[in-house]
Image (spheres, helix red, strand yellow):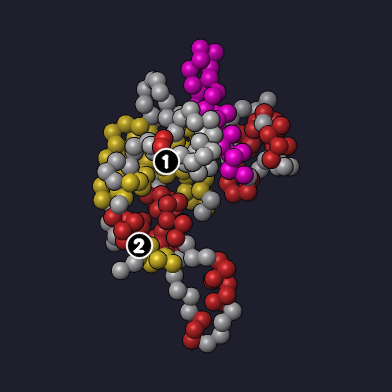
Amino acid sequence: MRDLERLTPPRRLFRVGRAPDPWAWPPWEFAGQDGTFGNRWDDRQGNYRVLYASSRLEGCFLETLSRFRPDPHVLAELAAIKGPEATSPPGVLPRSWLEARVIGEASVFGTFANVGSAASLAYLHKRLASRLVHYGIGELDGAAIRRTAPRAFTQEISSHIYARADARGRPLFSGIAYLSRFGDDYQNWAIFERLAGVPAIERPTVRDIDVDGRELRAALALLGLRLGD
């Protein structure tokens, strides 16, 4: 049987998170009733937490700011209007949101499962066949991993990868490597919390968000957002 393809992160990864420490694990008391924090690779069993990072700072902004993106139904209605009222106002990113967050940069070590590769998809399709049937997924492909599969299923994939170990019981993976739903330009990384062994995150640094920074401005443009007053 094909196995999961493995990737190692580049020298430094980026993360946008709450001040003062964007690399802090989310407090368990903020988990939802399903035991997760609502993210694609969280653990439904509540055994570990996950931090989400990207190889590019612009990718971090795209993932975290997407919640402010204009509603497509509103955009479609505005596009149908003729005349001077046809200008589509962008969504607004509150400055207060930025002020509460900082940029983290760190070296992240370990082996990550590249879930979107052909080998990994073939492995997961066979190994988790019963779960595919449970969720009504006829075929596990790249689109399902990135967008269409129920979040509960991708969270089960995360738990499966987390539990993989060698003959001596040592974990095989430090997390999951996956491409952003906003495009193949952005390689993202879901980092597992491990209670024992060498930590995956080393030499973290923190800096304030520059509202005029190139990466933030690029993300705002791609998402159709403007910075609030």
Could you tell me which secondary element the residue under label 2 belongs to? loop
| Horizontal and vertical percent position of residue 15 | 37, 44
Comparing 88 with 94, the one in front is 94
Quarter-wise, where is residue 24 in the image? top left
Residue that protrudes farthest toward the top in the picture:
168
Q: Residue at x 68, y 34 (%)?
A: 131
Circle 1: residue type: Phe
The residue indicated by pointer 1 is 30
**Residue 191 in sight in this render:** no
Q: Which residue is drawn at 53% across and 30% down?
A: 45
The residue indicated by pointer 2 is 94
Specify start and end residues of the magenta stretch as a single range: 150-173
Comparing 90 with 97, the one in front is 97
Circle 2: residue type: Pro
Q: Nearer the viewer, mark 1 or mark 2?
A: 1
Q: Does the magenta stretch include residue 88?
A: no
**On the rendered image, what quadrant is the N terminus found in?**
top right
Label whose residue precedes the other's in the sequence (1 or 2): 1
